[in-house]
Amino acid sequence: MPRSYFDRVLFLDADNVPARDPSFLFESPEFIDTGAVFWPDFWHPSHTIFNIHGQSLLWEILGTPFVNSFEQESGQLLIDRRRHAAPLDLVKFYTFHRPNPFTRLKLAHGDKDLFRFAWLKLKVPFHMVQTPPSVAGKVINGTFCGMTMVQHDSQGEVLFLHRNSNKLTGQVKRKKVYHRAEAIKRARNRLIEQGIFRFPDGKDIEEEEAKMNLTPAPTLEPLDPDGLPDPAMWSHLLSFNTTSRRVFYKIQPYRATPQFPDWQRCYGQRELGKNAHFYTQEFADLPYSGLETQIRQFAQDAMQIQAQT
């Protein structure tokens, strides 16, 4: 961002998709007033997996008082570089200076909070969107697995869908299959059938492995009916009630086996409808219901273009 040709920058992670045209943000009162708009993470001092709370050594290292607020999620940033050159330089220092106390002492995770830390340290105003993130995910046999962080505008309307827990690849995800042992066995049997009684050498084994590799490995997940390689993951949207207090906003990290693969990290509430502080909507009823199919198609198209170059 410091080297951008643009003075006013909306930065988005590659896996973060706007639900609608976000250009209105540049004319929003929050951006005009402060020149910097940030978005919250799932975590806050009374419910955090990163230990950013009132007792954290972080605040002593920063030299700033404890701030009782949501942590920051940096998958989207709206910054006027002309007005905020100093905090951007401090972010660069926090990121690249060695030794780095944030990573060495595990005071923060990656760069996600470094922006608000820099702004807080320099006492420069910014706006943090007040609506906590929603979670988009999929329901299988009554079990919900949230795999996308959903951010809002300052009016509480959905604006960004950050598919950060099951990323688009444009390719079918397949299990890792190791053919070596079976290739040795097959090469040995082939030699015996030819009346050759010796242990197969490297060339014999490689020939058998090449034959076995012609058969695609099993997929990690069943393919969707539309045939696109990346699975559709947005069937439901889990959101926090605006009338509930922040202390009740608790996004749980969990694994949802056997309905979902053991490697899949889920966020949200495993059983929908049991927490009165959250409500659920079906994606089919939302105005951006077709968005996921579009980006899955784009991912496949991109891989096909790459294969031709």
Image (cartoon, helix red, strand yellow):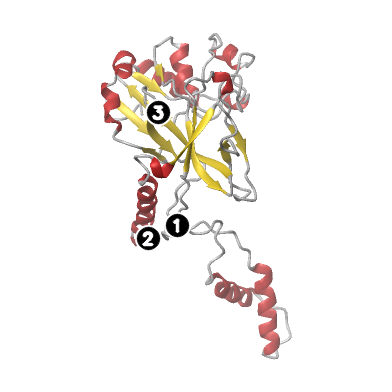
Q: Looking at the picture, how far across and down is residue 221, in whole percent?
A: 54, 56
At label 1, which amino acid type do we have? Answer: Pro
Which of disc 2 and disc 3 is earlier in sequence?
A: 3
Given the current orientation, which residue lies at the most extreme bottom position?
A: 195
Q: Nearer the viewer, mark 1 or mark 3?
A: 3
Tell which of 67 and 151 is nearer to you: 151
Tell me how far mark 2 sits from mark 1, CA to CA: 15 Å
Question: Foreground residue, 202 or 240?
Answer: 240
The disc labelled 2 sits on which kind of residue? Answer: Ala
Q: Which residue does the image show at 42% across and 61% down from the upper left? A: 227
Q: Quick one: label 1 or label 3, which is nearer the N terminus? A: 3
- State yes or no: discs 1 and 3 in contact (Cβ < 8 Å): no
Q: Quadrant of residue 288?
A: top left
Residue, disc 2: 307
- For image coordinates 63% across by 64% down, the residue present is 178
Q: Position of residue 295 (x, y in %)?
A: 37, 48
Drawn side of residue 145 relative to residue 186, left or right: left
Mark 3 surroundings: few (<14), some (14-19) or many (≥20) residues within 10 A: many
Dot 2: element: helix
Amino acid type, mark 3: His
Q: Which mark is residue 229?
A: 1
Residue 187 percent across, percent down from the top left:
66, 79
**Residue at disc 1, secondary structure:** loop
Distance Cα–Cα, label 1 vs label 3: 29 Å
- Residue 40 seen in the current view: yes
**Image coordinates for residue 152, horizontal then vertical, percent:** 40, 28
Q: What SS does tag 3 mark?
A: strand
Q: Which residue is mark 3?
A: 152
